[in-house]
Image (cartoon, grey):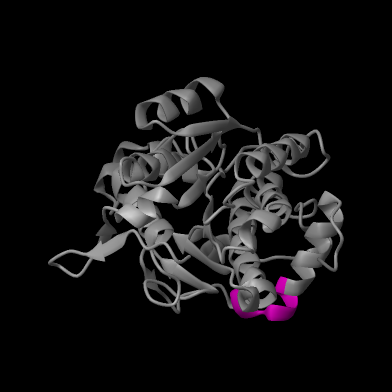
Amino acid sequence: MGKNLSHQNASGRRTTGEPSQTQAQTPTTIVITGASDGIGAAAARQLAGTGVRLLVVGRSPEKTAAVAREIDAEHFIADFARLDDVRRLAAELSAATAEHGIDVLANNAGGIFGDRTPTVDGFEKTLQVNHLAPFLLTNLLLPRLLPGGASVVNTSSMANRLFGHLDLSDLGNERRYSPRKAYGDAKLANVLFTRSLHAKFHDQGLSSAAFHPGLVRTSFSAGSASSMRWFYQSPLARFAPMISPEQGGATLAWFLTGVPGSTWTSGRYYDQDRPTTRVNPQADDLALAEGLWQRSAELVGLSPAR
């Protein structure tokens, strides 16, 4: 990234630090999607006042604007269940960052949903919101990401390992749908997308990572009919090793302010802030990653060879 805003505290944990005067003159530009609530909003709050330029993205105009006002950030609205919204968002972000580009893109928006419901674009909603939309957004923003050697950080989940198994001929789970399988597949797609970004663009300076933020105590899964809703909303959840949105946001902020190759390694999947070998067997299948890229590009109307 080139504009390091992190340092290690006495415990060795990397934390956000104050930028130098030179850095402040050309602030690091960070885009965070899913920033109206949860760990996205928490990370944005933690980065506020550190000299970075924050561009926060959310689906709710009211909630996103409120977060932006609180931290003096720029805000943008998009519903990832509508790919035209994603295309408009990419155009708006490109215009807003035309001078200095984007240093870090956090693909953090996502969710688990209920019955299998197609979006206005005709895709299963979990797949579109968690994978196809950030895939499209990232590709459309490459002209702003590549020149400065940016980082792309994808919020995944350990659900990729527990429930995910991708079939390129049935990405929308028409044959075997359940909310948790759809979510696991989409989060596995996040990991494979990270692998592909590294394979395709790391030699041009782009770095990418995916991470599981932990079991975060938020409104996640509130709109789902899956067993995950029962777990997250049940009184028993307080006995699970869950963390606060602020703790999950601190991990996201750690990636956003870190230095690829030093703080974290490009192309890897992390369990919170630690690289892990406990991964879905498909996560290391580079042929599957390339197949997913090609199929995703076809679905969203991009050139497959990009």
Query: Residues in magenta?
Result: 283-289
| Residue drawn at point x = 64 percent, y = 59 percent | 185
As drawn, 90 above or below 168: above
Q: Nearer the viewer, residue 156 or 13?
A: 13
Q: Which quadrant would the C terminus be assigned to in this image?
A: bottom right
Measuring 40% from the left and 54% from the top, which residue is drawn there? 252
Relative image position of residue 235 (x, y in whole percent): 30, 37
Residue at figure coordinates x 41%, y 25% from the top left: 69
Image side of residue 188 versus residue 301, left or right: left
Residue 280 lies in quadrant: bottom right
Residue 31 placed where, x, y %?
A: 52, 46
Q: Residue furthest top?
A: 62
On whether residue 288 falls in the magenta region, the answer is yes
- Most common secondary structure along the magenta stretch: helix
Quarter of the image for residue 23 reads: bottom left
| Residue 294 sits inside the magenta stretch | no
What number of labels is visible?
A: 0
Query: Residue at the spot x=45%, y=51% of the render?
Result: 26
